[in-house]
Amino acid sequence: MVSHVLHRRAFLSGITASSLLASVARAEGFIELDWDDLLPKDQTAIPNAIRELLPHDEQVPLSSQQPTSTGVRTDWNGHIVRIPGFIVPIDYNGSGVTAFILVPYVGACVHVPPPPANQLVFVTSPTPYESKGMFEPVNVIGMFGVSSLRTHLAEIGYALSADKIEPYRG
């Protein structure tokens, strides 16, 4: 509802809705990012319909089928951002996850080959997050930056030090 009201007010005042939402996000202390924002300019992500068609063979590690990254963006290095995604746990403290790969779609890195490195974010949190299970949708807020990291699941192009992890709300 709030989003609809913002879009209507933006339309009436001649301001683009995306610039208004970005201003609101900055006022709240973070920049709202989407997965397309992590791609180099003039490049697009793999469409959802094609992701399911990517060949994957259970005999071969999925990480070996990861598409080559086309580069990363440095625009948000050192900025506080919020980005939605799904949790692929890497490390736990008790029952809470303290390190995970944030992925843009369900199944990435585990059931289907991982997306390119520029579509993966390695998240660490000093406070364990009590996840409701693998692939839980979340919003993560924290310090963002470019990273070059390799795990047993994939190469990762970005890192985020989480200040807050919350269940996804659109």
Image (cartoon, rainbow, N blue to C red):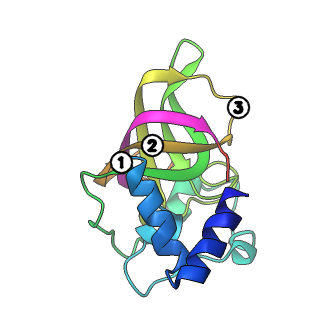
Camera-nearest label, 1 or 2: 2
Secondary structure found at label 1: strand
- N-term mark: 2 or 3: 3
Residue 50 is left or right of residue 165, and the answer is: right
Q: Separation of disc 2 and disc 3 at Cα? A: 19 Å
Residue type, numbered disc 1: Ala
Residue type, numbered disc 3: Gly
The quadrant in which the C terminus is found is bottom right
**Residue at x 52% of width, y 48% of height:** 102
Please tell me the numbered disc located at residue 133.
3
**Residue at x 70% of width, y 31% of height:** 133
Q: Separation of disc 3 and disc 1 at Cα? A: 21 Å
**Residue at x 55% of width, y 75% of height:** 17
The boundaries of the magenta stretch are 157-167
Secondary structure found at label 2: strand
Please tell me the numbered disc located at residue 159.
1
As rendered, which of 153 and 12 lies closer to the eye?
A: 12
Quadrant for residue 131, please give it. top right
Task: Classify mark 3: residues with Cα within 10 Å, few (<14), some (14-19) or many (20+).
Answer: few
Q: Separation of disc 1 and disc 2 at Cα? A: 12 Å
Question: x%, y% of residue 53?
Answer: 74, 74
- N-term mark: 3 or 1: 3
Q: Residue furthest top?
A: 94
Q: Is residue 84 above or below residue 75?
A: above
Residue 32 in sight from this viewpoint: no
- N-term mark: 1 or 2: 2
As rendered, which of 64 and 45 lies closer to the eye?
A: 45
Q: Which residue is mark 2?
A: 141
